Image (cartoon, grey):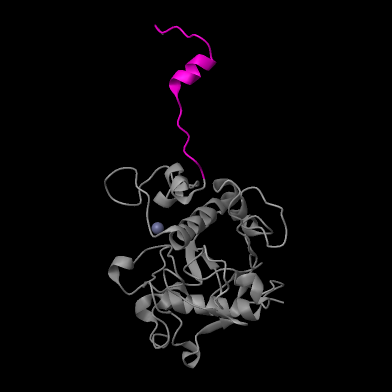
Amino acid sequence: MYNAHEHELPEWAKGTRLIDPPGVTSITPGSLTDFYHRMSGGQLDVRGYVWPRVYVTEYGQDHYKADSIDSQARFFVNGAAAASYEIITYVRDHPHGIPLAVDSLWDRYTNGQGDSLEADGKFDMIVILWRFSKFDFSSRPEERDKSSITSLGYTLPSGDGFARVNNGQGLWIHGLQVIDNTTAGSGIIGAAHTHKGAIAITVHELGHRHFGPYHTIDGQSSAYQSAFSVMGGSYSVMGPGDRLKLGWVEAVMINLEDIRNQHGAVSATN
Ligand SMILES: [Zn+2]
């Protein structure tokens, strides 16, 4: 039966192509699980599920732009948060086999302190990938035209973009609260049309959330420009400097004299 809210996933998002589930040791080449496994030298095991449908929003894109959500403005800080709320509640109510009722699967750390493996009653991480870009995330002009953000819509580091919904009860998925802010919230938004884009943007936003709010630069000038790291906006590795900071690699001093000796005498005149 046709469902106006559900379309088929693109091939690149099906199965475990984007992320491998918890409870198994297998790693799909090119998945987020594979990315973090390789980048961290096996230290970081990132697992999750992909909701197996594409959700089609109730209204067109313009409805969710910050300036045109009169009826929803009473509850949401901006149109992006309104859209995220609509998507999350739909998925919660139509899980399609995703075990959303098993709270322990979705609350593995303290939000905002990813290195603290203490459940805190808050849903850990929801990644919403929009299949169009240039979505307005804020009424602030300087925030316009961003395609991805380290929250579910809210642009402030504290508070909860869903605080006013449900008579002030906020947003819940079964026993866990879904909160929305840029440093300890329960989710991020990315815009991606390809597998490579989905991985790179998700990793970039999770990099802000979990590893520090920075963009990696190669020189002294403006942010966002490193050609060598996904934290500079490039595909698709965590750069060597970022991996050093994260403790995922060790710096090894190379003594050129030793290398020369190992390889025997090489003509010094070449
Ligand atoms: Zn960024």
Q: Within the magenta stretch, is there residue 63?
A: no
Res 253 → quadrant: top left
Q: Is residue 210 visible?
A: yes
Q: Within the magenta stretch, is there residue 263?
A: yes
Q: 244 and 2: which one is in front?
A: 244
Which residue is the extreme one toward the bottom?
A: 167
* Residue 157 horizontal side relative to residue 56, left or right: left
For residue 115, above or below residue 166: above
Residue 193 percent location from the top left of the image = 53, 57
Res 199 → quadrant: bottom right
Q: 85 and 7: which one is in front?
A: 85
Q: How many labels does the image show?
A: 0
For residue 152, above or below residue 202: below
Residue 106 percent location from the top left of the image = 61, 71
Residue 194 percent location from the top left of the image = 55, 54
Residue 157 percent location from the top left of the image = 38, 71
Q: Is residue 59 visible?
A: no
Q: In which quarter of the image is the C terminus?
A: top left
The residue located at (35%, 51%) in the rendering is 224
Res 154 → quadrant: bottom left
Ligand 1 quarter of the rendering: bottom left
Q: In which quarter of the image is the N terminus?
A: bottom right
For residue 225, above or below residue 202: above
Q: What stretch is highlighted in magenta?
A: 249-269
Magenta segment's dominant SS is loop
Q: 263 and 73: which one is in front?
A: 263
